[in-house]
Image: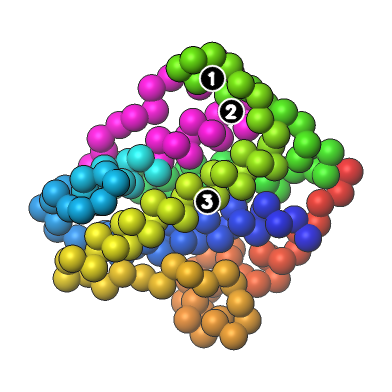
Amino acid sequence: MNYFLAQAMNNQWANHRLLSACAQLSEADYVAQRTGFFPSIRATLCHILEVDRYYLTALEGDRDGQIKDFSETLAFVPLVHKQTQTDQRLVAFCEALREADLARNVDLVRADGVVRERIDRLLLHLFEHQIHHRGQVHGMLSGTDVPPPQLDEFFLDCDRRFREKEEQSSQLSAPYIWRGFLSD
């Protein structure tokens, strides 16, 4: 199976769930100062998007594109649009992966120079980063009237009843998710 594709699809779905919950927030709650690594739900969601776009640009081999400043302070609707596009790019990238690609290195442009990282390790880092910061937004939602959504599911059959409506309105059905295999 293509583990990275399954992770990218779970990432896309978790972002969808989290952003759907955040869509119920007032503008004041979206921008309100909160306890977390970043000082608001907006700042944390913008950081997730910023890092996704930076690493995805590196994974796609666009060394010059990494120099772009990806940091933006976005209103909610534009953020959702850009995060959705970025999630789709990540799924497409992982869908195109072949076994030989995983050990290939890509350049990361950093403030102190260019470093090289393996694709498989960079993807694992990106997924971990997503999980970490989505958890922070989840915690911040606990301080609002919007109930935090379940984000700790990974497409288990026993939990399917909790996502039936989402599966009906998207391509995130179990057969679609588990169909992928890495091959040369």
Residue 71 spot, x, y in % from top left: 34, 30
Q: Mark 2 highlights which residue?
A: 58
Q: Nearer the viewer, residue 88 or 104?
A: 104
Quadrant that contains the N terminus: bottom right
What kind of element bears circle 1?
strand
Asked whether disc 2 touches disc 1, contact meaning CB atoms under 8 Å apart, the reply is: yes
Residue 106 visible, this angle: yes
Q: Residue at x 54, y 34 (%)?
A: 55
Q: Amino acid at mark 2?
A: Ala
Q: Which mark is residue 109?
A: 1
Mark 2: few/some/many CA within 10 Å (<14, 14-19, 20+): many
Decide: is 39 above or below 7.
Answer: above
Q: Mark 3 highlights which residue?
A: 128
Please provide the residue range marked out in magenta: 49-75
Quadrant of residue 72 within the rendered picture:
top left
Residue 152 spot, x, y in % from top left: 48, 70
Q: Residue at x 13, y 51 (%)?
A: 32
